[in-house]
Amino acid sequence: DNRWSLKGMTALVTGGTRGIGHAVVEELTGLGARIHTCSRTETELNEYLRDWEGKGFEVTGSVCDVSSRAQREKLMETVSSKFNGKLNILINNAGTGKPGRTVEFTAEEFSSIMAVNFEFVYHLCQLAHPLLKASGAGSIVLMSSVAGVVSLKYLSAYGATKGTSFYHRVYVAGPELLDKMIDIYLDNFASGALNQLAKSLACEWAQDNIRANSIAPWFIKTSLVEPFLSKKSFTEEVIRRTPLGRVGDPKEVSSLVAFLCLPASSYITGQTICVDGGMSINCFD
Ligand code: NDP
């Protein structure tokens, strides 16, 4: 029974040197997959590649800024030649958040967040399609955010991507936290779009036996959110609103990523799954 094994499978994980991506690389390789990863920082990437080699993991990597179209094309060429034109797993993990209030968001900032958090994902999926199809069984996981699932009051541009109406659930936040949330979660736009993209790809590429799902984490302890979590009062507020009473660990996200890539999840596609300690269903505080 190979339902719980990724042996013989190949995967591309973007942003594998830190945080969630790093945990995903280790999780998938532990289940037997061969991985290619990327990041923008050569020294850090090489450091981890050496570390993984030492542990006997089959992980290769190349420098790539996924916000560049040309670099994405080069990345996929590298992946194609490494894995003989076949890719089972695409984990679109790299991403970032751009703080800024809605009314102060410039056109350039808006384009920039769409380019980094959404356009690159869309394009990488396009580029990966022939490889995923050739593998015979493909799985795409989009790293979204719980901010693309729940709607934070006053985030008027929430509907901008027209992506999340299915998922419109109202999260009743107190005004004080809400203020801080608006600053952090402008990547809301892109996350909603990602959740919708997973649904669209799931239907369009089902005939090629490619599944697509998205994962929506709440606060996970990584370098991305360290500046926020280092503020004691902020963390206390986050924890107070999270039924499980704590923030998450990257390994608690990578386990779900792995499940969505395993043959064991072969009938699950087009879903958005929150990894959030219950935050998104906690309307009563
Ligand atoms: P980190 O910032 O800790 O790690 C990001 C990783 O991606 C690093 O390896 C980084 O390396 C790489 N990366 C970032 N930008 C690019 C780029 N343009 N091109 C290539 N590689 C890049 O982030 P997290 O692990 O916290 O986040 C991973 C994903 O999860 C993101 O999409 C984020 O939006 C999402 N998420 C995270 C949450 C959290 O609480 N942590 C909550 C909700 C969603 P380098 O900088 O060297 O390029």
Image (cartoon, helix red, strand yellow):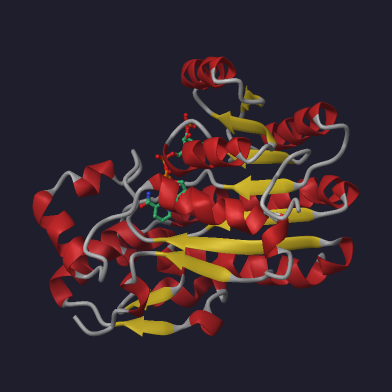
Q: Residue at x 23, y 77 (%)?
A: 173
Query: In the rendered view, does 162 fall on the left or right side of 224?
Result: right
For the C terminus, the image quarter is: bottom left
Query: In the rendered view, does 34 fall on the left or right side of 192?
Result: right
Q: Is residue 33 visible?
A: yes
Of residues 76 and 60, which is closer to you in this image? 60
Q: Is residue 108 visible?
A: no
Residue lying at the far left in this picture: please name it: 233
How many badges with numbers are in the image?
Answer: 0
Residue lying at the far front in this picture: please name it: 1
Q: Residue at x 35, y 48 (%)?
A: 249
Query: In the rendered view, does 137 fall on the left or right side of 68?
Result: right
Of residues 175 and 204, which is closer to you in this image? 204
In the image, residue 236 lies at what x, y percent?
13, 59
Q: Residue at x 84, y 62 (%)?
A: 209
Q: Is residue 141 above or below residue 72?
A: below
Q: Is residue 159 above or below residue 65?
A: below
